[in-house]
Amino acid sequence: MKKITAIFLCMILIQVLTAQTSTSLSNVIPKPVSVIENAGTFTFYKHTSIESPSSLLNAKKLLESQLQNYAFTNATTNNTEIEYILANEKEKMAKEGYKIAITPKVITITAKNIQGALMATNTLVQIQLLQKNAQQIPCGIIIDSPRFDYRGMHLDVSRHFYPISFIKKYIDLMALYKFNTFHWHLTDGPGWRLKINSYPKLTSIGAFRTHNDWKSWWNSDRKYLTEGDPNAYGGYYTQEQAKDIVAYAGARGITVIPEIEMPGHSNEVFVAYPELSCSGKPYVNDVFCAGNEASFEFIEKVLTEVMAIFPSKYIHIGGDEAGKGDWKKCPKCQQRMKEESLKTEEELQSYLVKRVEKFLNKNNRNLLGWDEILEGGLTPKATVMSWRGEKGGIQAAMENHDVIMTPGGETYFDAYQNIPSTQPEAIGGYLPMKRVYNYEPVPSSLPKEKQKYIKGTQAQLWSEYIPTSNHVEYMTYPRAIALSEVAWTPKENKNFDGFLQRLQSHYLLLQKLNVNYYHPSTLVEVFSKPDLTMQKNQINFTSEIYKANIRYTLDGSTPNMNAEKYEAPFYVGGEVTIKAAVVTNESVVHEATTFYANYHKAIGKKVKFNTPWDKSYPAQTESTLTNGIIGTITYSDKQWLGYTTDFDVVVDMENNTSLNKIGLRFMQYIGAGVYMPKWVTFSFSNDGTNFTNPIKIDNDVSDTDRKLSFKTFETKLINTSARYIRVQADNARRQFLFTDEILVN
Ligand code: ACM
């Protein structure tokens, strides 16, 4: 071989090796404002120097502490350096903005302030963790700044208590994805988790309960035990531990906001200090007595200790789900309402929140609360977390208040990530990663001049069904990675397919850090959409497996690895049983999904509604039941029409039509109060008035089975033709019925 050819081949080999071993800067999540990739790599050596001006010293310290976790080549020659530079006054750079320039010899990190330098450091640490060989990272330039100022992750440590070591891991992971706020839900009915010196019984009694398991405790008489009791379950953080967490988070650019719940969700307080409740007895109330000055003395003393630990601008005071029934019956509360001319109990809550806000403001802090603090009038400077959808957030923004968007449907990570039967028990709901990614925190209905009040978004981790820190990780990742891009990345840079591609390299990071993340599901999701011109359904498969090898059949047989490979959406007419499965590692065929595609005769036909659907679940209104679209596994996908009354509709087939089969599809999910009807009837008419030949189909699905189930109430028809079909379903139970389609063949 000629020498020149050998050198050339060698160069190609080096390029191939580099390509295999280094993950490009373009894989950073959240996707930065701009990334330029350059040739070459930077190598970390044991003697790689890190320089910084004094104002950015804490970023250098963070980098040192993160880098020392890895083994570096112990070379003294051929050294490299990392330099932090304070951007000059004239340089345009956003508050948390930064620039990282990586060349083979030098990494330069430029920021305007320490927060920007910390965000840059978190990015650099992530880039290193994405590499199979952590000693080398690719060259290039990243210029970056966040879309939103507030990028939060919440953690409920009341329903279940997690150790300080885990809180640190939670914060470490947050930092890698540039979240800047840790909302620590420290107090709630199931346990008070922060030592308060002036009220020691809050933790010696209020931090321990009788049962570990949530449902066992909730379904029992919900008792507490004293610290040290052999059966006591719970725990609390000392003030020193909490201060350590504040410092640990601060070193990573993260502010800790404590939440101290009031006036509701406070049962544990009254077990320790019953005199603060309306009845004066333990195990009776869950709201503070708003007529008793001792309640305010308690709140102020507790918040004084809390403020001494947490320097955050915000103090979260909860404010959610406070029942007003106790106040209605309490003479002291009623007396207070009279004295203060408060007309409703909502105004009494607002009175309490106002007093607390005044106290916080006097201490240079701002009040943050869940959207119930809007009821009875928002206090002057409060910031609102909009959890019951976006309505509260929109209202607060219209009133010129800052808002953090935390809607249940998009940001509650206690919801299922996949079909419930495939998952550990969760509280309910359905929030796959894609739905998190597609969340847009600025409502389109909000006028432009009010949009500035939307400060950001946050993931909620309510822990009823999350008993261990390992399980917190399962519920959090990778959904939090998706939310990081919602919170940080410019809207125009977001793209779900691109995100999925980038995400693939992050599984290595999660594995390196021993994160018990949710693995992408091998199930195939099937979507069917009618094409009225072709008179066929367009079939589309997706899977959480990136670029999945999907094999399918149309004859009802189980697909194997030689079955038809899915390349692009295709069309099928009439009734077809589709089975589709993901194949991984060349030959492992996973469980197939079965889908009944049906291009049926009622598609596009008008439906007259004799009984109305429930206003909360209008799906596609009049067109829902004949739009040819089969609902997915969640009733919130806008294809499932909700009913809380009996169901009674008439389909107009436009002409006298011969009918061979008819069906109406329902779902049951009793955890959410969704049941099958007891029966469904079909009857027929040619004048739309007189219906004859009713056929009744009884339900045969158990009403105690908690599994998500689907049933088409259907019947074959012989020698039947009609123009009008009346479909009725019983809902004597007056729970929810959800139906997605009337199928006529
Ligand atoms: C909440 O989920 N109760 C704020």
Image: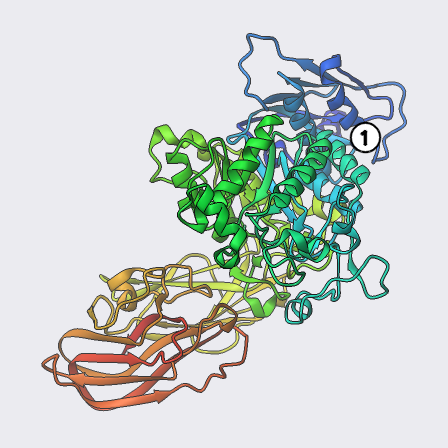
Residue 49 versus residue 191 in the image, above or below? above
Q: Which of the two residues, 163 or 321, is positioned nearer the viewer here?
A: 321
Tell me the SS state at disc 1: helix
Q: Residue 386, image x and y in percent?
A: 48, 44
Q: Residue 61, image x and y in percent?
A: 79, 24
Q: Is residue 115 left or right of residue 338?
A: right
Residue 624 versus residue 278 in the image, above or below? below
Residue plotted at (31% across, 76% down): 646
Residue 268 image-quadrant placement: bottom right
Residue behind mark 1: 65
Q: Residue 53, image x and y in percent?
A: 74, 12
Viewer can see residue 120: yes
**How many labels were placed on the picture?**
1
Quadrant (top left/top right/bottom left/bottom right) for the C terminus: bottom left
Q: Residue furthest left?
A: 687
Q: Is mark 1 within 8 Å of ligand 1?
A: no
Residue plotted at (71% across, 30% down): 250
Q: Which of the two residues, 603 or 160, is positioned nearer the viewer here?
A: 160
Residue 154 image-quadrant placement: top right
Label 1 crowding class (10 Å Cα cut-off): few <14, some 14-19, many 20+? Answer: few
